[in-house]
Image (cartoon, coloured by chain):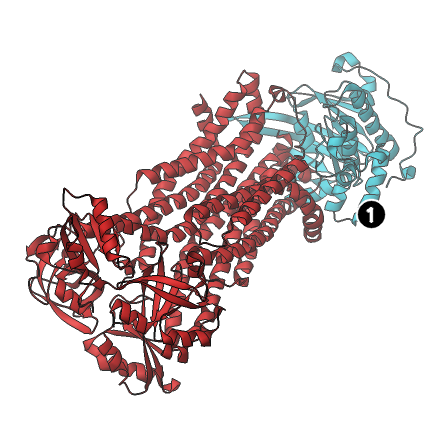
């Protein structure tokens, strides 16, 4: 069995709202292992985004323990957590959150530059990543010159450029049309298959389940399903079944040449 | 409804609203203070003149302040229609009792005759009826601790003279409180003690009821034919207005600059408010609010803040005016015998303050309000990505350029080549300057992009790495707002550089001029401080000075004001040129010094300053008509010399001509040369000892005199310094404010930066870097604009008040401005930077 990348043990997150405590996440225990593609689904307000924030160390739990890359997040200083995020974690968001003053290539190289990598080297690596997501010819374009699908590809490239141990995706298809959404899901699956990239994705998109190795369904902050989607009846989770494309024959991770 | 919506928003954004209000407050404060100061001094002067003039219909006064012959009285009385003519003599002088000293104004009158025109009311005692008797105001009595029948010592032209207090005046009479300490003497007594024997300073005239005043005035003018001025009493207040004009102009400029900086704050704040509430506003639109109503909503908020800021500004302006009046009084009103008084709020100032504050707010808010009405109701329904980059086409840049060119062209076309500046033209130039500045504001956003590419980005990347890059680029996100902030800093620093440069230039020019022209070792005058002595010196005293051991040469110098042919005042100097040429040499602009001196010694010649040459269009070789008590006399102009006195121009004639035409032997001060320079201190002591108790003399060495005048320059600029720092403060607020806006608007972006691995201090670097860029651009542009403005001020100064100024760069001011720009900006940037660094990543990421 592959090593765990994220481990949650009895994790809770309570917010104070209007004087009363609201449990967004309630006693969740789960493990994400290297190379897994985990999809978290649930209705609005089920706590899935909070769960993602807890797993990625953006927030600390009010109860239980979160271990990210072998370190317990609540024991870390803000700077240490930032460094873990910078070096070991990648993020993609519903609103692509690219810096509008930078072109695609510059946006992708940003995390490397923040980590003080030599600009030429950072540029080289960012180019490879843009190539990976199929946007080599859009490197010099600014965000306002790209389509939604392209923007999300740039965001994926930015998330992958620092070779993260785990990629967290928060509704990555939420702001895309169905064709672009499907392309993004396929791209994520592709990175998992080719690079062995660990991915945790929170989504509403029913097609996403089909791309995942494991589907976690939340309701009222509690995990109510946690299994391989290919073994779950679509009706149970409200998920449309679809067999993922067979990517087994794609380039192996080591030979990718992207890094 | 607007009220409720606006009030709620303003209350939620308390600190920002406060900053906005403060911005307006500071601007309005200065405008109101300047208006009130002007009004206070003028009304004080007018009250004074009214008090002096009493019921008189017409007044005869000298062209120069040295009085005219008593015989004019008979001539005036012989004019048909003149019912009563009342002579008087005026002089300010120090009075002493024991250790106490009060500077007071004294009138020499014939009490019985004078009461026909003026109300003198006695609180107790009687009017002076014999020699050496005086009636004084309660204020003067209190100042010296005088009681009825006490003796006080008054400084006369030849020494201290004892006067007995025989009456205490009710200040509601002639003095009306305007004069402050004030005393009445017998006419003959005053003529004698002030060296005005057989002379008068004024004849007040009552025209009989059946005569035509205009006709009487014309007849008087014809009879006196240029030997004295004839006019209504209040015409004299015009002289004061002229004097005040240049001071008020400089102060108004400071006020306008603070207000301008304030308007930039409003602009950034309102546009920030609009940006922040795009969603709210689009919801309002979706719910059915019309564009016009959105506009009203935004403008209501700005108007409310403007109103509040203006109200506070009125109160502060009132306080500042009080200080200003005192400062100005200390500087030059003393020589007009005016005492500073409490400032009174007037309707003009209130209306002006409110109008300026509110209109500025509305205009500044107009631009963002226009953006607000363009918000589509659809935006409420749409999620959004990070804010994009506001694009600026070349059109704005061209418009800005056109405005600058228009301003420059206007200035160039109207540049006076054959006349002095008129106040109207000065104001038009002020507007042209405003147009140029507005052009810069409009054009700057377009300029920012190349500036960023070639200067800021490379620089900041070098300093901060990638965070510097992000910081530099952020300036381009909202180029208009950035430009407004930069402009706020730019104008205040430009003003700082200009005024610092002017101060340095004026002092350096004065220094050089002084070194060359003032060659005497000691200067003797009566104890009044400053250039203008109030009590002149008797010729006997001057003769006696020559007897002091070690004194090599004694040269009496006369100085006073003179009304030139164009009706405006100038400075009159009467020197003994046979002596002057031994210790002085003026820098000449036209003609040569030595031959000019030969001509001056011959008499009938005059040397003039460039301002007089310009005003009257005379040059060397021309004849210059001067009004004298002996009628208009023509003097041949033999040279134009460089002048540093700010009295609108100087005319220098020889003492022999002065004595002949003005029939005046007194002198304002005496230049003394000693036999051995090393004995200066000893000789000064000897002079002081010789007169001692007899007459308090001020004996200044060359260096002391220089230091005294220098300190007057510095005092004048000290006030300016306060105003400059207020403007700098406002611009600091503007920077902090804009950065707060930029942080709040881009919180999601900061969230992303944090999520992808920026540490808190790197986020701070982004904001501080942005502040630094603002400071850098504002600082350099401000210094550049300031230097240009200084060149312009140097060029115009001589045309405004006649004082030449050589252009000098004040490196210390430039260093200060640069420090302010490069330190103040990042410093005030720290607050918003901390806010950005402390943002909760998750909340920031979810922010829309």
Q: Which chain is red?
A: B
Q: Residues within 10 Å of mark 1 (few under 14, many from 20)?
A: few
- Position above or below: B837 against B86: above
B637 or A185: which is nearer to us?
Answer: B637
B170 or B156: which is nearer to us?
Answer: B156
Residue B129 on image: x %, y % = 6, 62
Residue B838 visible, this orientation: no
Query: Could you tell me which chain the residue with mark 1 belongs to?
Result: A
Looking at the rendered image, the quarter that the N terminus of chain B falls into is: top left
- Is B408 displayed left or right of B428 in the figure? right
Residue sitting at 37 percent across and 47 percent down?
B34
Q: Colour of chain A?
A: cyan
Quadrant location of residue B308?
Answer: top left
- Is A204 displayed left or right of B92 in the figure? right
Quadrant location of residue B184?
Answer: bottom left
Residue A10 on image: x %, y % = 67, 30
Residue sitting at 87 percent across and 39 percent down?
A258
- Position above or below: B101 against A43: below
B507 or A139: which is nearer to us?
Answer: B507
Looking at the rendered image, the quarter that the C terminus of chain B falls into is: top right
- Position above or below: B379 against B755: above
Residue B247 on image: x %, y % = 39, 53
Residue A115 visible, this orientation: yes
Residue sitting at 40 percent across and 80 percent down?
B582
Residue, disc 1? A121
Residue B452 on image: x %, y % = 68, 46
- Position above or below: B616 against B424: below
């Amino acid at each position: 069995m592959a090593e765990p990348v994220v481990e949650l043990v009895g994790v809770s997150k309570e917010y104070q709202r209007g004087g009363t405590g609201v449990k967004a996440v309630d006693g969740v225990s789960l493990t994400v292992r290297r190379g897994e593609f985990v999809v978290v689904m649930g209705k609005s307000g089920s706590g899935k985004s909070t769960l993602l924030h807890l797993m990625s160390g953006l927030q600390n739990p009010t109860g239980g323990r979160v271990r990210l890359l072998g370190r317990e997040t609540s024991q870390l200083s803000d700077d240490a957590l930032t460094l873990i995020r910078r070096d070991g974690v990648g993020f993609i968001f519903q609103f692509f959150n690219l810096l509008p003053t930078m072109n695609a290539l510059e946006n992708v190289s940003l995390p490397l530059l923040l980590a003080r990598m030599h600009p030429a080297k950072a540029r080289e690596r960012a180019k490879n990543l843009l190539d990976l997501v199929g946007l080599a010819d859009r490197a010099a374009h600014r965000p306002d010159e790209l389509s939604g699908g392209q923007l999300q590809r740039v965001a994926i490239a930015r998330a992958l450029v620092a070779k993260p141990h785990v990629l967290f995706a928060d509704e990555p298809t939420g702001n895309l049309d169905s064709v672009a959404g499907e392309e993004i899901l396929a791209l994520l699956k592709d990175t998992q298959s080719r690079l062995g990239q660990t991915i945790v994705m929170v989504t509403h998109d029913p097609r996403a389940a089909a791309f995942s190795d494991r589907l976690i369904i939340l309701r009222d902050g509690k995990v109510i399903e946690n299994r391989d989607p290919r073994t779950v009846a679509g009706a149970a989770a409200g998920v449309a079944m679809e067999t993922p494309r067979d990517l087994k024959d794609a380039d192996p991770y080591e030979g990718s040449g992207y890094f | 409804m607007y009220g409720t919506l606006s009030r709620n928003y303003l209350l939620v954004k308390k600190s920002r609203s406060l900053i906005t209000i403060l911005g307006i407050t500071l601007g309005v404060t200065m405008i109101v203070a300047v208006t009130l100061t002007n009004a206070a001094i003028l009304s004080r002067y007018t009250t004074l003149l009214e008090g002096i003039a009493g019921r008189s219909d017409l007044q005869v006064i000298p062209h120069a302040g040295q009085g005219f012959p008593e015989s004019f009285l008979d001539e005036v009385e012989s004019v048909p229609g003149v019912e009563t003519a009342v002579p008087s003599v005026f002089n300010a002088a120090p009075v002493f009792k024991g250790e106490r000293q009060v500077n007071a104004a004294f009138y020499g009158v014939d009490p019985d005759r004078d009461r026909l025109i003026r109300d003198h009311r006695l609180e107790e005692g009687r009017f002076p009826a014999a020699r050496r008797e005086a009636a004084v105001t309660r204020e003067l009595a209190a100042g010296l601790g005088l009681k009825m029948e006490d003796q006080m010592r008054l400084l006369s032209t030849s020494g201290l003279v004892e006067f007995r207090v025989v009456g205490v005046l009710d200040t509601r009479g002639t003095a009306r409180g305007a004069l402050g300490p004030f005393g009445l003497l017998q006419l003959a007594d005053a003529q004698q003690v002030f060296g005005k024997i057989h002379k008068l300073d004024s004849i007040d005239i009552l025209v009989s009821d059946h005569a035509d005043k205009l006709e009487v005035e014309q007849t008087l003018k014809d009879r006196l034919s240029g030997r004295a001025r004839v006019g209504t009493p209040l015409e004299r207040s015009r002289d004061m207005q002229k004097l005040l004009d240049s001071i008020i102009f400089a102060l108004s400029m400071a006020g306008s600059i603070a207000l301008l900086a304030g308007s930039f704050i409003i602009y950034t704040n309102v546009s920030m408010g609009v940006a922040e509430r795009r969603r709210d506003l689009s919801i309002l639109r979706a719910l059915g609010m019309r564009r016009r109503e959105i506009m009203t909503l935004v403008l209501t908020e700005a108007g409310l803040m403007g109103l509040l800021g203006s109200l506070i500004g009125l109160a502060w302006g009132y306080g500042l005016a009080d200080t200003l009046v005192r400062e100005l009084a200390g500087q030059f009103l003393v020589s007009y015998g005016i005492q500073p008084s409490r400032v009174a709020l007037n309707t003009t100032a209130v209306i002006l303050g409110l109008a300026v504050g509110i209109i500025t707010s509305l205009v500044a808010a107009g631009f963002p309000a226009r953006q607000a009405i363009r918000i589509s109701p659809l935006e409420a329904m749409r999620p959004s990505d990070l804010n994009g980059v506001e694009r600026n086409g070349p059109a704005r840049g061209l418009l800005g350029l056109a405005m600058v060119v228009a301003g420059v062209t206007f200035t160039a076309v109207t540049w006076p080549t054959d006349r002095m500046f008129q106040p109207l033209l000065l104001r038009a130039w002020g507007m042209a300057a405003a147009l140029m500045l507005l052009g810069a504001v409009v054009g700057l956003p377009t300029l920012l992009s190349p500036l960023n590419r070639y200067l800021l980005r490379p620089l900041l990347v070098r300093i901060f790495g990638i965070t510097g890059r992000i910081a530099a680029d952020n300036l381009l996100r909202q180029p208009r707002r950035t430009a407004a902030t930069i402009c706020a800093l730019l104008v205040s620093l430009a003003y700082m550089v200009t005024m610092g440069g002017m101060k340095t230039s004026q002092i350096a020019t004065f220094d050089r001029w002084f070194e060359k022209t003032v060659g005497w070792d000691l200067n003797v005058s009566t104890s009044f401080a400053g250039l203008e002595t109030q009590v002149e010196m008797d010729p006997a005293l001057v003769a006696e000075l020559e007897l002091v051991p070690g004194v090599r040469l004694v040269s009496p110098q006369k100085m006073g004001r003179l009304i030139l042919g164009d009706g405006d005042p100038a400075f009159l100097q009467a020197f003994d040129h046979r002596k002057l040429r031994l210790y002085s040499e003026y820098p000449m602009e036209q003609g040569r010094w030595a031959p000019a001196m030969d001509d001056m010694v011959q008499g009938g010649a005059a040397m003039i300053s460039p301002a007089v040459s310009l005003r009257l269009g005379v040059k060397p070789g021309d004849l210059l008509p001067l009004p004298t008590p002996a009628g208009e006399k023509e003097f041949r102009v033999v040279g134009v010399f460089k002048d540093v006195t700010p009295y609108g121009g100087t005319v220098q004639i020889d003492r022999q001509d002065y004595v002949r035409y003005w029939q005046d032997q007194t002198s304002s001060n005496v230049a003394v040369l000693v036999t051995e320079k090393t004995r200066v201190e000893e000789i000064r002591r000897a002079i002081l000892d010789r007169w001692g108790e007899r007459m308090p003399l001020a004996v200044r060495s060359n260096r002391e005199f220089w230091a005294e005048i220098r300190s007057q320059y510095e005092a004048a600029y000290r006030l300016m310094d306060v105003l400059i720092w207020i403007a700098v403060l406002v611009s600091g607020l503007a920077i902090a404010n804009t950065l707060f806006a930029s942080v709040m608007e881009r919180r999601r972006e900061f969230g992303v930066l944090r999520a992808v691995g920026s540490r808190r201090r790197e986020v701070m670097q982004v904001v501080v870097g942005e502040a630094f860029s603002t400071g850098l651009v504002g600082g350099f542009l401000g210094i550049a604009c300031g230097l240009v403005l200084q060149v312009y001020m140097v060029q115009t100064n001589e045309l405004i008040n006649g004082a030449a100024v050589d252009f000098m760069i004040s490196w210390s001011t430039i260093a200060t401005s640069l420090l302010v720009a490069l330190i103040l900006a990042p410093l005030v940037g720290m607050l918003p930077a901390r806010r950005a660094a402390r943002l909760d990543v998750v909340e920031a990421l979810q922010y829309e």
